[in-house]
Amino acid sequence: MGDLNNTQGIASAPKRFFFETLTGIAIFGIIALAAVGLSFFVKFLDVNGIDPVIVVCLKGAEYAIFFMDIILFGRFLWRTGLKTWGEL
């Protein structure tokens, strides 16, 4: 009986990793869509003659949001992977 419970515990760790990864991908996608939306907005402002300083600052914010999203997503996957590895 003890081996059966241990096998179920091993099987649940990859399942948890899978669902936590899907959650992370969804959050990454939502934040990336916000960065893409900001990109379209910045292009719209640039075409309509808004002050270049404002456009450059918003472009910097767009890149900062996207790069932080990538960095934090990678960190999330790394920590989730280590946690899952420890549970196996």
Image (spheres, grey):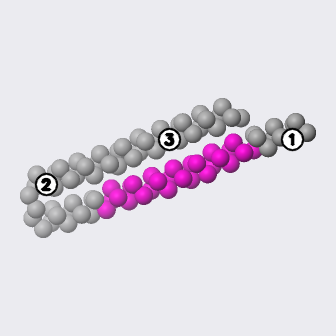
Q: Disc 2 or 1, which lies upstream in sequence?
A: 1
Q: Nearer the viewer, mark 2 or mark 1?
A: 1
Residue on which disc 1 sits:
4
The disc label shown at residue 54, or none? 2
Judge the density around disc 2: few (<14), some (14-19), many (≥20) Cα neighbours within 10 Å: few
The correct choice, above or below, for 81 with respect to 28 in the image is above
Judge the density around disc 1: few (<14), some (14-19), many (≥20) Cα neighbours within 10 Å: few
Q: Which residue does the image show at 66% across and 31% down from the upper left?
A: 86
The disc label shown at residue 66, or none? none
The type of residue carrying mark 3 is Phe
Q: Quadrant of the C terminus?
A: top right
- In this picture, which residue range is highlighted in magenta? 11-37
Q: Position of residue 78 (x, y in %)?
A: 53, 37
Q: Is residue 77 left or right of residue 35?
A: right
Q: Are the residues tagged 3 and 2 within 8 Å (C-beta)? A: no
Q: Position of residue 66 (x, y in %)?
A: 35, 49
Q: Are the residues tagged 2 and 1 within 8 Å (C-beta)? A: no
Q: Quadrant of the N terminus?
A: top right
Asked which secondary structure carries label 2, the reply is helix
